[in-house]
Image (tube, coloured by chain):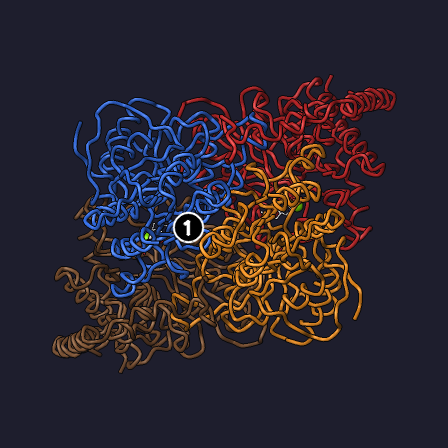
Chain colours: A brown, B red, C blue, D orange
Amino acid sequence: MPKKKDQHTELGLKQEDLLEMYRFMLLGRLCDERQWGFNRQGKAPFVVPVSGHEGAQVGSGWAFERGKDVFCPYYRDMALVLVAGFSARDVFLGLFGKKDDPSSGGRQMPAHWGSAKRNIITGSSPIATQVLHAAGIAYSKKLKGEDAVVGTWFGEGGTSEGDWHGAMNFAGIHQLPMVFICENNQYAISVHESKQVAGRVYKRAEGYGMPGVEADGNNVLDAFRVTKEAVDRARSGGGPSLIELRTYRYYSHTSDDDDRTYRTREEVDEWRAKDPIPRFEEYLKSVEMLDDARIAEIRDETQAEVARGAQEAQDADFPDPIDAMKNVYAESEVAS
Amino acid sequence: MPKKKDQHTELGLKQEDLLEMYRFMLLGRLCDERQWGFNRQGKAPFVVPVSGHEGAQVGSGWAFERGKDVFCPYYRDMALVLVAGFSARDVFLGLFGKKDDPSSGGRQMPAHWGSAKRNIITGSSPIATQVLHAAGIAYSKKLKGEDAVVGTWFGEGGTSEGDWHGAMNFAGIHQLPMVFICENNQYAISVHESKQVAGRVYKRAEGYGMPGVEADGNNVLDAFRVTKEAVDRARSGGGPSLIELRTYRYYSHTSDDDDRTYRTREEVDEWRAKDPIPRFEEYLKSVEMLDDARIAEIRDETQAEVARGAQEAQDADFPDPIDAMKNVYAESEVAS
Amino acid sequence: MTEKNMVQTIRDTLFEEMKRDERVLVLGEDVGARGGVFRATMGFVDEFGQDRVLDTPLDECLIAGISIGMAIDGLRPVAEMQFADFIFPAFNQIVQEAARIRYRSNGDFTVPMVIRAPYGGGVHGALYHSQSIEAFFAHVPGLKVVAPVTPYDAKGMLLQAIDDPDPVIFLEHKKTYRSIKGEVPDERYTIPFGRAEIRREGSDVTCVSYGLMMHYCLEAAERLTSEGVDVEVIDLRSMYPLDMETVLSSVGKTGKAMIVYEDNKFLGLGAEVAAQIAENALFELDGPIVRIGGPHVPAMPYSPTLEHWFLPDADRIEQEMRKLAEF
Amino acid sequence: MTEKNMVQTIRDTLFEEMKRDERVLVLGEDVGARGGVFRATMGFVDEFGQDRVLDTPLDECLIAGISIGMAIDGLRPVAEMQFADFIFPAFNQIVQEAARIRYRSNGDFTVPMVIRAPYGGGVHGALYHSQSIEAFFAHVPGLKVVAPVTPYDAKGMLLQAIDDPDPVIFLEHKKTYRSIKGEVPDERYTIPFGRAEIRREGSDVTCVSYGLMMHYCLEAAERLTSEGVDVEVIDLRSMYPLDMETVLSSVGKTGKAMIVYEDNKFLGLGAEVAAQIAENALFELDGPIVRIGGPHVPAMPYSPTLEHWFLPDADRIEQEMRKLAEF
Ligand SMILES: Cc1ncc(C[n+]2csc(CCOP(=O)(O)OP(=O)(O)O)c2C)c(N)n1
Ligand SMILES: Cc1ncc(C[n+]2csc(CCOP(=O)(O)OP(=O)(O)O)c2C)c(N)n1
Ligand SMILES: [Mg+2]
Ligand SMILES: [Mg+2]
């Protein structure tokens, strides 16, 4: 019973897919709102928001095969790591720096994602280092003859570092099975794209011998479509691709930032009007998969899931100080 | 009396220009052959050859205004620094590490060019660092409202470093008065272009918001033409350009290298047949500026100039060991 | 005289200097409209314009590399590394280029540039917003490395750094930005590098420190007066050049030396200080040379329990001072 | 047993290991057809193919970064930095990523990789082909740094480095490549890190060294026997972990300690060794702790007169040994 304006069937997406994608977008948004709440209450000193990026992250993330493919995200990617297997509880364990934080056991700042069993490669703060790790993993997969595809995500600011240049060059030379995904929200903290990127990000692909494409990151199905094409091409030996997803971040860069110094409220409102979540709701209604009543239900369920995860994380233990000595080296030796 | 097949008049080059350009190409070649001679005799432990690149270097270098414009060369650029004001004697003072070596007073290896009064910025061994210095100088010139243009030269291997990426990006963003000149001889020591550069060097320009063009580096007039256009554009506020000059190096990478491990003799011979010097001689004959007799005279004069410079450099003093402490800091303080 | 905190002092000093000297410009990530993530260039872009208050792309290698070019061409760039932890992409340009250009050109080229870097822990910054970096750079001939910890020093040493004809790594401890206040003269003055400051005279133990730890050392020393233990606290201020004269004459007086630093102990700056004492004053010592430094783990973790464990504090310093005094 | 020089030993060891273990691959600039500029991977590409003998683009940041990815995915990359002097573009990937990944992921991810780096002077390499880099990396928790100087150690420690579950900086002194020969067992063996080797027993002075200087120290010590001066020479072999036990027990015996290294003295490894002696064995000393290191200039100049001036040699070491013994 797909209705008119049906875009998803040709993309190979079924009703369950769409509803799950919708849930993940919502989960990301609600986790974000909850963490800001904790921040205002003084219970979370540091918050990295995702709001605005949910379409780009869930759409691109959904194009990969969980359990087989590899995710090399950056700090903005909360909705992406939810797709990759993090729970709301996992997110809040990291937020509070608790012992069971799957990323680092409370060692890293929030939003420094990582989890071996979920194929999410540990990330750091220094920008763009992960894109080279992704290239190395992709080379390894190809060498071993595995058909996994490696995805790496970064902001447009990340394209400025030499690491990004090296990874693009290496991936192009060896036609590696990977996809470079730029979440272009037009700002690197306060620095506008026009002072960050000469030319256009996606246009750099040709110079590295790979296809480059841009898409509307606030349209989750567009983000899925262009990424899926790239993932399929990579898996079938067609080499790497660069994808630029245009989007916007709704909050300040982090809880330490104040975006009013560099963005007008008008600009923010303009982009609020393109919010990927209501837009996807409209689509789901248009194909009669959702109605307002069902949306309200799903929101309540997801809200409850967030509240539960947050509560469990708050109740969880902090790491034992003495554990701070562990895992410096395999033998955890310490300087005499 | 310019004859048919006259390419130079439309390029604004007069007879004196062409003959000087020819002399510089020859001077570079003969200095190179002489330094190899010293190397074989054990009098010069380290030699960096230029042979093959003379057309690319003299052609591109000639497009700049000496005394006003700025040169940021790399080690391969002997013929270029001759254009920029080095003498044969200067070259050999550097070769032998003598006190009066204008580049470093005998501190750096040969071919690490530099001279403040000639606007040749000091170079180091680490590849591609100079392109960022060039970008900084170009920014400074623009800020001060000077109409100098900055040229920076590098091999295709140099395009792989992050420094090159950063400089291209910055130059594109601020539309700096500079020209990026790649002497693409297809090898970085032993590594072929196909393992070094994904895609094509000149095609990367568009991704940085600047024009990119390739030309035959073994045709000195082509090298001049494309560079002159870029220099004029830069000087008139039109921003930066990337130029790829296809060429070849005839000797091993340096006297420490043995190119037989990675290049066939056939390939070398093929490129020997495209030697920029005889090709330019052919042109100069075709426009009746030279004949074989005159060529023989110029060769003898230049040979004599090289012999004189080499002899004077051999006779020159080595630096005084105690001078090794000087110029660490302005006050030349030393660790207690 | 005006009372100011550290970051305000740095901001005002830079502002005045840019007014005074056209050649000076600031560059880095978010130094423009945002005024720097620590507000050290707040309001600059309105006063001096985008060309002299340059928001760079997110590439520290670029920041250092173009600063070198600018300095060579006669400007006086003051580059900001947003956090010291992010200086490493620029390591090659700083260590191989900036530091070596005067030497390799035999004085024909010079690089008068300043790199400002907010560093240090205790700010919930975790592994990548808490690091100490002084040891990497103090080891490199051609560089100068300084770390003022009072507003008075911050102004005088920042102006000295800008005047200096050679590259200077100017370290600002993030935790002192707002916590440390002091009187700052309104007129321009400079403080020559390589002169340590005795912050507290004492006769029993010489305590050498710098950065945030120096303040903790003063606190610990004050506490010990009640016990009749009299500690001399020396603020190095400059890591290179290093003022061993002041350190050695103090050790000659007290016969006991300890060095306190936040960086991990192994090959941290305290190693050089201890080594030079052992080379030059061994027989004036009547106690072992004590070093208190960070543990051998890669910078402090985020979780409050772990961060507290990591950072040396006044209590621990006090204990070690007491032990050494009693030795 | 076969007699080999250093570089031949390294080449053969790598070759055998790549035959033995499919996960091992070498990567770097010119490691393929060229066999490495020092011939350390000569003939590898014919035996193992281009995919396991990977000629990388000219980008050390890339070399380190992809090695990390490969190691995370289960390979055992052995990366070559063509010259140690060119490791700095990779500094961020090595120090911030490779060194910290185990720690920051609380053990969830590990980086078993080796970075080989030909280093050191005396080869007419001038400023950028002569540097010592051990101090930068030994200071970084999460890294191990070793520098074997005999073929026997080169094999055992290279295999240890490949087996090691953490990143190892493996330093090879260029001047020893062909000048130092020795017997090498044909079978596979490993030498655990963190164990110094007493190369020469002695009772009068403890001389701690490593790298090329260690050989000069041995030479100087031999010369002094004629004068009845008996020097104990310790080869550290590993900069981190550092075997202070061996050093301290030797100092306990001789009461005199000197440290000889090629790197510039200030904050070079000798500073840490001296500091730890001063912390732990102060009252066993009856002479100052002497450090001989390179001068405070940015690596050695090219001109023969200048290069000779720079590098500590056996004569200078001998004089200092004599002075200290007579103290
Ligand atoms: C090497 C490095 N330099 C600077 C920073 C500080 N910093 C953190 S995020 C950021 C901006 C990143 O912008 P972008 O890549 O566009 O991602 P976005 O935050 O917009 O999603 C900066 C400058 C850093 N983390 N690492
Ligand atoms: C950072 C760095 N890495 C490695 C080297 C060693 N090296 C010197 S020249 C060279 C090849 C450069 O090739 P290319 O840029 O194409 O210039 P060409 O020599 O071909 O003219 C290499 C790898 C270096 N000098 N610097
Ligand atoms: Mg952004
Ligand atoms: Mg080349």
Q: Which residue is mark 1?
A: C289
- Element type at marker 1? loop
| The C terminus of chain D - image quarter | top right
Residue drawn at 50 percent across, 35 percent down: B336
Q: Position of residue B107 (x, y in %)?
A: 64, 32
Q: Position of residue A27 (x, y in %)?
A: 23, 72
Callout 1 crowding tier (Cα within 10 Å): few <14, some 14–19, many ≥20 = many
- Judge whether residue C26 can be spotted in this image: yes
Between D81 and B298, the one lying in front of the other is D81
Q: Position of residue A155 (x, y in %)?
A: 36, 56
Residue at mark 1: chain: C
| The N terminus of chain D - image quarter | bottom right
| Image quadrant assignment for residue C30 | top left
Q: Position of residue C28 (x, y in %)?
A: 36, 41
B140 horizontally vs D128: left or right: left
In the rendered image, the vertical position of residue B258 relative to residue D47, given as above or below: above
Residue drawn at 57 percent across, 55 percent down: B198
A60 horizontally vs D292: left or right: left
Residue drawn at 27 percent across, 61 percent down: C308
Between B247 and A87, the one lying in front of the other is A87
Between B13 and B144, the one lying in front of the other is B144
| Ligand 1 under 8 Å from disc 1 Cβ | no
Between A326 and D92, the one lying in front of the other is A326
Residue drawn at 78 percent across, 33 percent down: B35
| Image quadrant assignment for residue D190 | bottom right
In the rendered image, the vertical position of residue C228 relative to residue A293, given as above or below: above
Amino acid on which the number 1 mark rests in the picture: Ile
- Judge whether residue A170 can be spotted in this image: no
D298 horizontally vs A20: left or right: right
